[in-house]
Image (spheres, grey):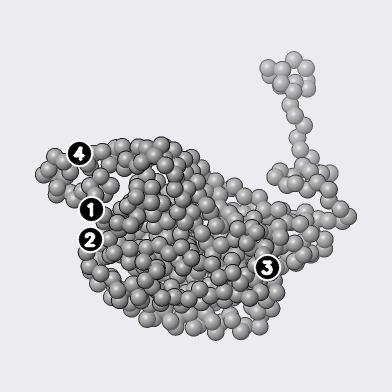
Amino acid sequence: MTADQEPHGRVPSAPPPIGPAASLSDMPGADVGGIQGDRMVLNMGPSHPATHGVLRLILELEGETIAKATPDIGYLHRGDEKIAENMTYTQFIPYTDRLDYLAPLANNVAYVMAVEKLLGIDQALPPRCQYIRVICCELARISSHLLGLGSLALDLGAMTVFLHIFTEREKIYNLIESLTGARFTTSYTRIGGLSRDLPPDWTGQLRHFLHSFATPIRELDLFLTRNRIFVDRTKGIGVLPKEVAVDYGVTGANLRGSGVEFDLRKAHPYLVYSDLVFDVPVGSVGDCYDRYLVRVEELRQSVRLVHQCLDQLPDGPINVADGKVVLPAKEKVLTRMEELIHQFILVTQGINAPAGEVYFSAENPKGELGFYLNSKGGGVPHRLKIRSPSFVTISTLPYLLKGHLVSDVMAILGSLDFVMGECDR
């Protein structure tokens, strides 16, 4: 064996160059071919507080101006869509908590409604179940928008806003814990209904929070909307014209901030949204400031929606009356053979879904969260595809960041309000 060989005759590869001698092309994951002039390549992330998760941005700079921006994603990839092919429809519900982990209640609702559409029971949901689901979705929207706005403020130096917002989110988490038994990963919704009904006096606690929440929204408005530093850092920064937003497929508050009045709750109503009154706020310029204003107004509209749901909340069952979809009552499982058989089949084999394919999407806090299901029959999906709004949002970064200063990156990322758990899946 010669000195330049390792055991078994393998010739070792040369180590990558380190330091000043390193070529830009040696950087892993970076397509930096064709760099012109005196550009510098800057890695921002994946461990950076302003990237709102494990996002890596490869920035080519001319001085402090961004000449090119390349997002590098996948650091949080878990293969959720492939995992779904190996478990029953019900078993996948906890995995939806881990998509947009700032709004797990809304993720649960969007997924189970796709399955219910496949089963053909989406029109049979009891009214009480539908109203409770809307309450859950709007609470999730309030909680998610609060963190998005607080993070944007913190990234631009307004730490007081961030601390105030976390106080309000803590109150929401207390309500969610009382309702679902968990604060973060709720897994509350079930195919055909809900895991449990509202606890005693829960509606009274929720009304108390809604009445007190008017003050924090007003304080948020006072802190930021006319704050000279905040306005200068956000107005005219990260402009996303409506035509470009539509071409990229952007949805949610980011699309409405660009002046496109599109909200799935009005355009394609689901649950009881068609019976509720609310406005869809839109921007005019499509910059960071517009996206901020849209989310602040959506907080008020969500409060308005929850108030209506509480006023109109009916009595009655919370699950469809179908023993082959919903688990039977425990006392019947212990005393009757038919319910025992249904319980055994649902737990071991899953719901017997028909063959076919469906797509359902909901207006989540981050935008349109869609689920495509392909079934060949039986209790396990053949294919599942998640339409992630955060993934689409991040695809706009090469367009939005180009021509801005490095200091503007924090404002643009914060105003887009994405979450990497949903992007990478």
Query: SS for tag 1?
Result: loop
Query: SS for tag 3?
Result: loop
Dot 3 corresponds to which residue?
A: 241
Q: Nearer the observer, disc 1 or disc 2?
A: 1
Residue 285 versus residue 106: which sits nearer the camera?
Answer: 285
Dot 1 corresponds to which residue?
A: 321
Q: Earlier in the sequence, mark 4 or mark 3?
A: 3
- How packed is label 2: few (under 14 Cα within 10 Å), some, or many (20 or more)? some
Residue 79 vertical placement versus 168 (above, below): above
In 3D space, how far apart are the residues under numbered discs 1 and 3 (Cα atoms)? Answer: 48 Å
Q: Earlier in the sequence, mark 1 or mark 3?
A: 3
Dot 2 corresponds to which residue?
A: 317
Q: Earlier in the sequence, mark 2 or mark 3?
A: 3
Disc 1 + disc 2, Cβ < 8 Å: yes
How many badges with numbers are in the image?
4
Q: Residue at x 51, y 42 (%)?
A: 79
Disc 1 + disc 4, Cβ < 8 Å: no
Q: Earlier in the sequence, mark 2 or mark 4?
A: 2
Residue 269 vertical placement versus 93 (above, below): below
Q: Residue at x 28, y 75 (%)?
A: 204
Q: Label 4 is placed on what type of residue?
A: Ile
Dot 4 corresponds to which residue?
A: 341
Q: Residue at x 72, y 17 (%)?
A: 9
Residue located farthest toward the left when viewing the structure as drawn: 335
Q: Label 3 is placed on what type of residue?
A: Pro
Q: Label 1 is placed on what type of residue?
A: Ala
In 3D space, how far apart are the residues under numbered discs 2 and 4 (Cα atoms)? Answer: 23 Å
Q: Tell me if residue 358 can be seen.
A: yes
